[in-house]
Image (tube, grey):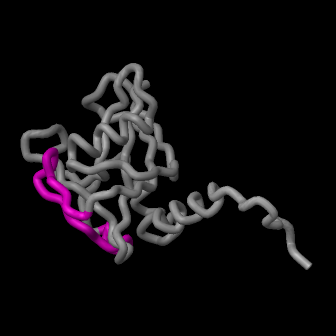
Amino acid sequence: MRQVVAAVIEGDDRRLLIGQRKRRDTSPLKWEFPGGKVEPGESPEQALARELREELAATLRKCVPIGRVIHKYAATPEDLEILFYAVEILETELAPRAFEQLIWVLPKELGGYDFLAANAQLVAQLATGRIKPGEILQAASNSSRPTSPGQNSGSGR
């Protein structure tokens, strides 16, 4: 089984970044979340950072897993395990190196785009608000903050 990673990047205005595959790619002009194959010797997080650099000229700041799908495309010999991550990047200006175009869309608008079949379940969860990448990243940041010495993490008095 081949592992693939995908980044769900939410902007400050809650819009999500999606990319349209190039005309000459497999599944031409379909929409997807940025990402790609995990190479031998890479962790999924390392692959995500590399793919963001290659596809968007972006630097991965943090990521949190938000979903996993096993999918088989007719044109590929093996199943794909797609790992979706809520992602925060450092840059605000992106270069669509691997895409026909990049756009930011509201979650409720995702259904209006022709996504790759493997993205369908995640797209539905994002569009209906069952998965909110920005909130997931924020919650992960809050839970990973160290407690200051002497600070009571209990219920208080």
Q: In this view, does 32 lie to the left or right of 78?
A: left
Is residue 119 in view? no
Q: Quadrant of the C terminus?
A: bottom right
Residue located 81% across and 63% down the image: 150
Residue located 31% across and 43% down the image: 35
Residue 102 in the image: state x and y as whole percent.
Answer: 18, 59
Residue located 33% across and 71% down the image: 15
Residue 6 or residue 141, whichever sits in front: 141
Q: Considering only vertical position in the picture, is 80 above or below 149?
A: above
Q: In this view, does 134 lie to the left or right of 73?
A: right
Which quarter of the picture shows residue 144? bottom right
Task: Inspect the magenta stretch and tell me whether residue 72 lies in it.
Answer: no
Which quarter of the picture shows residue 122? bottom left
Residue 79 in the image: state x and y as whole percent.
Answer: 40, 29
Residue located 7% across and 40% down the image: 24
Residue 144 or residue 140, whichever sits in front: 144
Q: In which quarter of the image is the N terminus?
A: top left
Is residue 134 in view? yes
Q: In this view, does 19 lie to the left or right of 9?
A: left
Residue sticking out furthest to the front: 149
Residue 52 in the image: state x and y as whole percent.
Answer: 28, 45
Task: Inspect the magenta stretch and tell me whether residue 106 lies in it.
Answer: yes
Residue 87 in the image: state x and y as whole percent.
Answer: 41, 54
Q: Considering only vertical position in the picture, is 4 above or below 99?
A: above
- Span shown in magenta: 92-111
